[in-house]
Image (cartoon, rainbow, N blue to C red):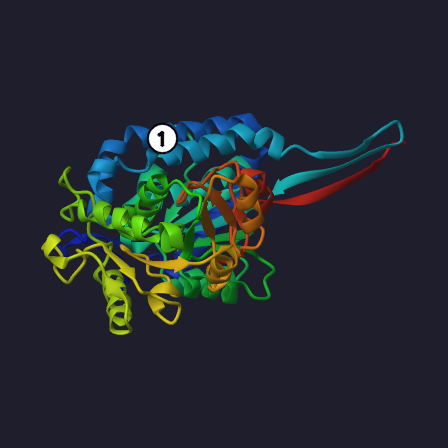
């Protein structure tokens, strides 16, 4: 019996796409083709690999109108937002721009006696396991620099976004990247783990759940395969007593609700200085009350369905538990009659919350945010650090020195001041605690996708 992966559309619950998974034999053959093709690919001049990746990115841009509608059907993002090509292109282009410097040898000595230097060489075959929430941007974070660095790539995309890998393969192959150098594959969990355990890959990059990351590390145990993981977050925002309230509320609430809250670096909890709390909350409520929940194919829709009913059910459960424990919901359900108890979920703001509630501890990954009042920086720092995750933290103040001092005390991968929910490709995208380990993009992204090789050449 042949297994398959299915995408159930959140728009109407229909089967939108289905693909057969590779058997372990066929998957192993795909790895072998990638290994064989990688040697010639790595031997090509760096500028040629860069040009081919840039051309592939351009081809994706040419498909964008079709892609935007496909994303709405696959994971529910409203078409009004125009897809992901802006960020996709920015990230790939930056990594192409810095490649020559990032991959340049480190010269220790070049004298009449010795040549001593360190090269960055590709791992070989890189497995990229990408998530559904930002399926193009998260994939390109690793795919572009991995290819540029001389690796071949196998991309395994999430079942909710089955068409994304096919579109990337279509674009990159049309641009001239060999079919065996970049392969889109459909694999079940067992086959994926078996390939990793067999030492099939030089590096594995996984973006997804904590449980998924643990499975990747277990599979790699004893193989010495490098595993990079980005496993989600419970990202805080802290509005200090001197913050620009209007800017803070507009940005933080958008960071909490955009993409129906399905952002790994989205804002999931907000701490506000006592003197600004009431004003912040009132303005936050007004913003959310203006949202339109509905079919993502409708250009008037500002918040679409969650990608799957089970994701919405988890948010409902966290919200219900918090209310039962004393939290106060501020958004009237009557404003969102489109909430059907399924994938279509209304946005919600909660106050009178505390850290005994799952909605302030567990990843929600949906359109709900809890807002707490704090008396000073020390209390805010303690609460922000009271989390098993550490991806980003957003600080709102007019004082750069204060933001730096507070940021130094927060256990996280990225500190933002007066912005949030953004990935800067020039900076390392990384985390700590249960958010995982590793680093993508920037010069460090290239270091993780290559290994150092030292040359100590004594001249005759």
Give the total of numbered labels: 1
The reply to whether residue 290 is in sight is yes
Identify which residue, 285 or 211, lies in the foreground.
285
Q: Is residue 194 visible?
A: no
Q: Position of residue 191 (x, y in %)?
A: 41, 62
- Indicate the position of residue 370 as horizontal and vertical percent values: 32, 59
Judge whether 393 appears above or below 96 on screen: below
Q: Quadrant of residue 175?
A: top left
Does dot 1 land on a helix, a strand or a loop? helix
Residue at 57% across / 57% down in the picture? 225
Q: Position of residue 432 (x, y in %)?
A: 53, 57
Residue at horizontal 14 percent and vertical 46 percent from the top? 295
Is 299 or 452 nearer to us in this picture?
299
Q: In the figure, 334 relative to 254: above or below?
A: below
Q: Is residue 161 left or right of residue 339?
A: right
Q: Quadrant of residue 246?
A: top left
The local crowd at label 1, few if under 14, some if 14 to 19, many if 20 or more residues have their Cα within 10 Å, is some
| Residue 364 position within the rendered picture, expressed as x and y whole percent measured from the top left | 33, 61
**Which of these two is toward me, 347 or 129?**
347
Residue sitting nearer the eye, 320 or 402: 402
Say which residue label 1 marks: 174
Look at the image and tell me in which quarter the C terminus lies: top right
Q: Which residue corresponds to the image point at 57% horizontal and 42% vertical from the top-left?
A: 401
């Amino acid at each position: 019996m042949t297994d398959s992966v299915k995408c159930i559309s959140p728009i109407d619950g229909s089967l939108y796409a289905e693909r057969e998974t590779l058997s372990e034999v066929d998957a192993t053959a795909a790895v072998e083709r990638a290994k064989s093709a990688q040697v010639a690919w790595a031997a090509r001049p760096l500028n040629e690999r860069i040009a081919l990746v840039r051309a592939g990115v351009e081809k994706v841009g040419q498909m964008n109108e079709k892609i935007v509608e496909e994303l709405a059907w696959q994971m529910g993002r409203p078409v009004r937002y125009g897809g992901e090509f802006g960020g996709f292109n920015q990230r790939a282009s930056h990594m192409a721009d810095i490649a020559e410097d990032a991959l340049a040898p480190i010269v220790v000595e070049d004298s009449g006696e010795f040549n001593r230097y360190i090269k960055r060489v590709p791992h070989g075959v890189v497995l990229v396991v990408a998530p559904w929430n930002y399926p193009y941007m998260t994939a390109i974070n690793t795919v572009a620099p991995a290819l540029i660095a001389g690796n071949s790539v196998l991309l395994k995309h999430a079942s909710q976004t089955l068409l994304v890998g096919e579109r990337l393969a279509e674009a990159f192959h049309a641009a001239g990247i060999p079919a065996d150098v970049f392969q889109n594959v459909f694999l079940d969990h067992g086959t994926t783990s078996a390939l990793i355990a067999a030492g099939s890959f030089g590096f594995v990059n996984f973006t997804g759940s904590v449980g998924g990351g643990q499975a990747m590390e277990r599979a790699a145990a004893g193989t010495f395969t490098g595993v990079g993981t980005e496993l989600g977050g419970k990202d805080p925002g802290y509005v200090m007593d001197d913050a620009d309230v209007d800017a803070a509320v507009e940005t933080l609430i958008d960071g909490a609700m955009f993409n129906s809250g399905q952002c790994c670096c989205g804002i999931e909890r907000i701490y506000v200085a006592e003197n600004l709390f009431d004003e912040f909350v009132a303005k936050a409520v007004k913003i959310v009350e203006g949202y339109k929940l509905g079919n993502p194919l409708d250009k008037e829709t500002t918040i679409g369905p969650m990608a799957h009913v089970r994701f919405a059910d988890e948010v409902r459960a966290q919200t219900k538990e918090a209310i039962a424990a004393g939290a106060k919901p501020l958004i009237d359900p009557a404003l969102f009659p489109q909430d059907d108890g399924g994938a279509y979920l209304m946005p919600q703001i909660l106050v009178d919350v505390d850290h005994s509630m799952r909605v302030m501890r567990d990843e929600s990954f949906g359109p709900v945010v809890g807002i707490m009042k704090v008396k000073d920086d020390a209390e805010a720092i303690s609460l922000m650090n009271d989390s098993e995750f550490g991806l980003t933290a957003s600080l709102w103040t007019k004082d750069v020195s204060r933001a730096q001092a507070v940021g130094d005390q927060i256990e996280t991968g990225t500190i933002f001041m007066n912005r949030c929910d953004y990935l800067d490709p020039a900076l390392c995208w990384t985390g700590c605690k249960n958010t995982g380990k590793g680093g993508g993009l920037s010069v460090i992204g290239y270091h993780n996708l290559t290994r150092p090789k030292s040359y100590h050449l004594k001249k005759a």
